[in-house]
Image (cartoon, helix red, strand yellow):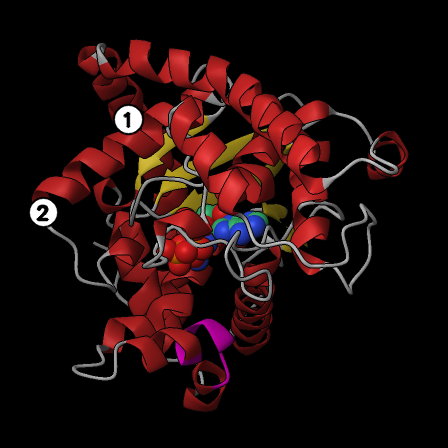
Amino acid sequence: MKKGKVFSGVQPSGALTIGNYIGALRNFVGLQDEFDCYYCIVDLHAITVPQIPKNLRKRTLDVLALYIASGIDPEKSTLFIQSHVPAHSELSWVLSTITYMGQLNRMTQYKEKAKKSEENLNAGLFTYPVLMASDILLYQADFVPVGDDQKQHLELARDLAERFNNRYSETFKVPEPLISEFGARIMSLQNPESKMSKSDDDENAYILLLDDSDTINRKIKRAVTDSIGEIRYCDEQPGLKNLLNIYSVFSNEDVESLVKKYDGIGYGKFKEDLSEVVIEGLKPIQEKYLQLTNSKDYLEDVYKKGAEKAAYVSGKTLRKVYKKIGFIPK
Ligand code: ATP
Ligand code: LTN
């Protein structure tokens, strides 16, 4: 029987946080055996905010190394760089002609980013979700594992697939989001009302996958909690709730037993233990990452092979699309 397909992407727009790991990367690993998986480094998306070329180059390879260090096996999954496969940009143009301005105007991520960059708001930021839909639809993906913040973009991808299928004929698979019930939204350590984001101006707001132990200790010590002083898992204590979620992921203990374990014990000890669990959890990823960054040839081999396979699969879909629209085949 043919395996179902999975597609997801991460932007090389900054160093990856434990939010990216918990909401996305960690879930990619478990899908590799059951599905034909495509994991992309979406550099075309990353340039919707200004990037320094040298940093973009480094971060792109860093994301690739972190994909592999987190347990994604290039022998099982296709790992590639978005700009190496022109079909992404090509389908994006086509889909933009069936996307309504109103739909893009309603996108929360766009509204938030637009607020932040009031001067010279670029059109790429606005059409970003169309490019994301193209990424997914080109591979006929059944499932798209993402964090909670991408739900609305996924809805657009589904909508565009259905609109195209209705207008022409069955062409695209309508993809389903895969958003895990737990850890799909890790919050900022400084403001538990907003999501942990690698582009936050305050570096105490996030923990990076590559942070060293002193930095992790310091950031967790400074993490915002409350004055209640009791370890409980509830919406009235959002900072603590977030820390408990992180603790649970890295320790594999459920939140309930953590709450019991820390009953009557203060935040200080809880934070100390949490730091240790996070440091230990990240250690194998960091070690593997270090090894990989010394193997540039290996990384190059992975992304070249990945692009070849991705170009083949996406090319088939794009040709079908062009034919249905009425373009003359080459
Ligand atoms: P930025 O914060 O710079 O806008 P981002 O980290 O949200 O970027 P990506 O790197 O493209 O954007 O995200 C990769 C994946 O990580 C996506 O599936 C996204 O949903 C997930 N993700 C990002 N932040 C979090 C978070 N705080 N909690 C859970 N999942 C997250
Ligand atoms: N928009 C996503 C990154 C992204 C993506 C994708 C995720 C681009 N293309 C395709 C899943 C599938 C983000 O900002 N996190």
Please give the residue where the numbered disc 1 appears in the rendered image.
Answer: 303
Q: Which residue is mark 2?
A: 53
User: Residue 130 location in percent, x, y?
Assistant: 40, 68
On the picture, is 127 further left or further right than 5? left
Nearer mark to the viewer, of 2 and 1: 2
> Looking at the figure, which quarter contains the N terminus?
top right
Is 109 a magenta residue? yes
Measured as percent of width and height from the top left, residue 18 is found at 51, 38
Q: Which residue is pictured at 78% across the width and 63% down the height?
A: 235
Magenta part of the protein: which range? 106-111
Element type where label 1 sits in the image = helix
Q: What residue is at 26 percent from the left and 77 percent from the top?
A: 117
- The part of the image, by quadrant, that contains residue 131 is bottom left
Residue count near mark 2 (Cα–Cα under 10 Å), binned few <14, some 14–19, many ≥20 = few
Query: Dividing the image into 4 quarters, which one contains the C terminus?
Result: bottom left
* CB at disc 2 and ligand 1 closer than 8 Å: no
Please say whether residue 139 is visible from this viewpoint.
Answer: no
Q: Position of residue 183 (x, y in %)?
A: 67, 45
Residue type pointed to by label 1 = Tyr
Image coordinates of residue 205 in percent, x first then y, are 45, 52
Q: Nearer the viewer, residue 14 or 175?
A: 14
Q: Of residues 93 and 170, which is closer to you in this image?
A: 93
**Front residue of 227 and 133:** 227
Work out whether 48 lies above or below 305.
Answer: below
Q: Which SS type dominates the magenta stretch?
A: helix
Residue at x 62% of width, y 59% of height: 174
Which comes sooner in the sequence, label 2 or label 1? 2
Q: Nearer the viewer, residue 105 or 159?
A: 105
Relative to 202, does residue 31 appear above or below in the rendering? above
Q: Amino acid at mark 2?
A: Pro
Residue 50 included in the magenta stretch of the image: no
